[in-house]
Amino acid sequence: MFNSASIVLIIDRDKFSSANISNDIRKLGLAKTTVCLKSASDALAYLEKQQNCGYPFPEIIFYNPHKSDLNQGEFMDTYRVKFSKHCDSKIILLEEKNDDSYGHQLLEDSLIEGELRKPISAGQLLRIFQKEMKEHVPR
């Protein structure tokens, strides 16, 4: 029996990429709700609302730091201070196809569980969910 994630959060300025990831997650039945936000500050506001209202946090957060409104350090430090003690979301780094400038720095952060390089396939998403949700995902 497969239990999908309740909420997945995608933080990416690239609307096309977010839509593709969200669509693949929906088609594969990997999450009940997918929230797509284009900025790190919007994501922090969303997480704060979830916390203040007692709503559940996302199980998985896909985060693309490329061209973000906050630098990666600001986002990760704020997340760590405000939310990491209250939730156990798995953060997966989204990397641009030809850009290595962000990923290597963030991969050393203890909150980052893994990385995916764009373009992201449905098979890659399935493997991430198998690993991070520690549940059997039907093929």
Image: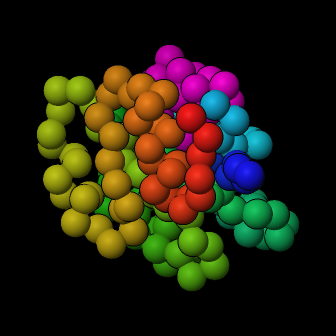
Image point (44%, 31%), residue name: 123
The outermost residue toward the top is 16
Q: Quadrant of the C terminus?
A: top right
Residue 100, visible in the rendered structure: yes
Please identify the dominant SS of the magenta region: helix
| Region of the chain picked out in magenta, as a range | 10-27
Q: Is residue 112 left or right of residue 45?
A: left
Vertical side of 108 occupied by 63: above or below: above
Q: Is residue 11 magenta?
A: yes
Q: x and y percent of residue 121 in the render?
A: 42, 26
Q: x and y percent of residue 109 in the render?
A: 29, 68
Q: Nearer the viewer, residue 89 or 31?
A: 31
Image point (69%, 35%), residue name: 29
Tell me, what colour scheme is on the image? rainbow
Vertical side of 126 occupied by 50: above or below: below
Q: Is residue 107 left or right of residue 90?
A: left
Image point (29%, 34%), residue name: 117
Q: x and y percent of residue 98 in the render?
A: 17, 26
The outermost residue toward the right is 53
Q: Is residue 96 magenta?
A: no
Q: Quadrant of residue 45?
A: bottom right
